């Protein structure tokens, strides 16, 4: 199907009309050139050009969903492509015997800055949305589309675009880069590392089992078929390392050379082999063998162990991306974290009062929330004038809230210079323990990073160990310098430094 998007005027290097049509093999070089041009005009565009050819040939490419927007002069002004992550049903339509029980795909769309806000983005990804609805059938099969966007002011438009389509942020990824000298290789004595290539296709099935066992139970992963690994071994510029303790496989690394850089795509270690230096040995060997001018990889922001390993090897954070997800047929209700509006004030006030009264009655029965405190909690309109107030909305109902005060804002109680102050975190008592506070804190911390502050400060009532434990699990550190003591309450200070 060909869809035309007409313009209302203005300069347009792609002509007065753009036709959205299916991707064809002849578009490969032009799509790669488009990627370079789009990135030159907008740094938030992902550098997909070099990986496009391998993606087209790969077994996961959902080519029927790929689209290009072509101007009258043949110039591309937009592209969209999708790749299968996991499949809940097999080719015969029967339920799959393995996997995570849902179908999901990675989605990417890019439009030239001069052609945005004209409906091209929606037209480019419309086939993917229709595909997802078709995969869901009668709603028995959960379906998800995932997209990644840089967490930067330049990418705010892309984030708004995804939110408008019903995507929601579910996690974050950090991009790490390395440009140092290859470290010395210090593997544990019994550990053997083998560099695999196209002659080692017999190892593909073993690698597939190793990959699935290594990632079992981890979030944001999918089953790795042996066919994928067979193609990877034969890919030009591909580097695959297998680690063994004696005859027992321990882990593997997969990377690809892109010019003078090495893109490390996977480092996987079996659970029983972790904390034995396997991951470090694999990365050290890859850097030593490839001797790249630079190396890059991505890691889930919540994976503190991996971040610590890569940091010790000289990798530093270079970027952060938000992972958005659009779901259909998923039993989970839709959670949206957004800024509060005037019509939310009453709900937020009662939520805070209910949350604090109920929490203290259950955990600290000696604490009394008096009328003056309740009145302060209900003063949401005043708080919105001096702070960023967020709400968690579950299927249209406000069920959680938190407030973030900028440096210098009235009533900011941060003791560190230039720090933000976080307060009034609350979730509806009946819904506590389901991860909703995490979503609120994720967004508050994202906003604080965008402000460029060096830290977030907060206070916890002394004795409230459950809340203190929540913040410590996210990296907040006790700092007695910020403690506050009032006639009726003593507060312990914590800080998260960026």
Image: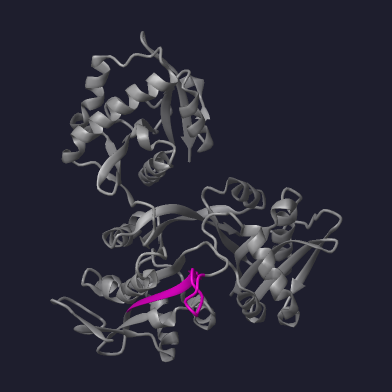
Residue placed farthest to the top in the image?
487
At 26% across and 83% down in the image, what residue appears? 14
Question: Which quadrant of the view contains residue 17?
Answer: bottom left
| Camera-side residue of 478 and 138 | 138
Q: Is residue 311 left or right of residue 406?
A: right
Q: In the image, residue 293 lies at what x, y percent?
A: 63, 66
Q: From the viewer's perspective, is residue 251 above or below residue 81?
A: above
Report the colour scheme: one colour
Q: In the image, residue 322 lies at what x, y percent?
A: 42, 55
| Camera-side residue of 167 and 304 | 167
At 19% across and 77% down in the image, what residue appears? 11
At 61% across and 57% down in the image, what residue appears? 216
**Is residue 145 visible in the rendered structure shown here?**
no
| Camera-side residue of 46 and 342 | 342
Q: In the image, residue 386 lies at what x, y percent?
A: 24, 33
| Camera-side residue of 95 and 482 | 95
Q: Quadrant of the N terminus?
A: bottom left
Q: Is residue 417 left or right of residue 245?
A: left
Question: Which quadrant of the view contains residue 315?
Answer: bottom right
Q: Is residue 160 left or right of residue 151?
A: left
**Is residue 106 visible in the rendered structure shown here?**
yes
In magenta segment, residue 187? no
Q: In the image, residue 464 lies at what x, y percent?
A: 46, 22
Q: Which residues are magenta?
A: 78-95
């Amino acid at each position: 199907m060909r869809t035309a998007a007409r313009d209302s005027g203005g300069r347009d290097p792609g002509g007065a009309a753009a036709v959205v049509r299916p991707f064809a093999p002849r578009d490969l070089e032009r799509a790669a050139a488009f990627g370079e041009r789009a990135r030159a005009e907008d740094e938030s565009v992902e550098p997909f050009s070099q990986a496009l050819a391998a993606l087209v040939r790969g077994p996961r490419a959902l080519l029927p969903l790929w689209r290009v927007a072509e101007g009258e002069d043949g110039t591309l002004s937009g592209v969209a492509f999708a790749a299968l992550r996991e499949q809940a049903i097999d080719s015969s339509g029967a339920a799959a015997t393995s996997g995570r029980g849902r179908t999901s795909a990675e989605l990417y769309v890019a439009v030239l800055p001069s052609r945005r806000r004209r409906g091209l983005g929606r037209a480019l990804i419309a086939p993917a949305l229709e595909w997802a609805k078709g995969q869901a059938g009668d709603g028995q099969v959960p379906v998800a589309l995932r997209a990644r966007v840089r967490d930067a002011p330049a990418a705010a438009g892309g984030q708004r675009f995804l939110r408008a389509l019903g995507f929601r942020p579910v996690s974050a990824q950090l991009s790490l880069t390395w440009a140092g000298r290859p470290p010395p290789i210090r593997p544990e004595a019994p550990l053997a590392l083998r560099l695999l290539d196209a002659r080692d296709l017999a190892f593909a099935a073993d690698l597939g089992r190793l990959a699935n066992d290594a990632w079992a139970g981890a979030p944001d992963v999918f089953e790795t078929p042996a066919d994928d690994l067979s193609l990877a071994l034969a890919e030009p510029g591909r580097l695959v390392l297998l680690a063994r303790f004696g005859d027992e496989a321990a882990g593997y690394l997969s990377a690809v050379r892109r010019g003078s850089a090495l893109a490390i795509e996977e480092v996987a270690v079996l659970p029983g082999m972790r904390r034995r230096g396997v991951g470090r040995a694999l990365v050290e060997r890859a850097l030593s063998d490839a001797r790249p001018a630079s190396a890059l990889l991505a890691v889930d922001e919540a994976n503190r162990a991996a971040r610590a390993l890569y940091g010790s090897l000289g990798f530093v954070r270079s970027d952060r991306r938000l992972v958005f997800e659009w779901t259909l047929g998923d039993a989970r209700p839709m959670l949206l974290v957004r800024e509060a509006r005037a019509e939310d004030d009453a709900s937020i006030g009662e939520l805070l009062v209910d949350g604090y009264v109920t929490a203290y009655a259950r955990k600290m029965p000696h604490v009394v929330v008096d009328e003056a405190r309740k009145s302060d909690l209900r003063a949401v309109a005043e708080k919105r004038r001096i702070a960023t107030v967020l709400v968690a909305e579950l299927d249209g109902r406000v069920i959680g809230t938190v407030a973030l005060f900028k440096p210098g804002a009235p009533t900011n109680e941060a003791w560190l210079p230039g720090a933000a102050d976080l307060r009034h975190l609350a979730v509806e008592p009946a819904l506590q323990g389901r991860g909703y506070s995490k979503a609120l804190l994720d967004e508050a911390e994202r906003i604080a990073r965008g402000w460029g502050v060096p830290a977030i400060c907060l206070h916890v009532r002394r004795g409230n160990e459950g809340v203190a434990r929540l913040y410590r699990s996210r990296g907040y550190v006790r700092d007695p310098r910020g403690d506050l003591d009032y006639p009726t309450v003593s507060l312990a200070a914590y800080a998260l430094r960026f």
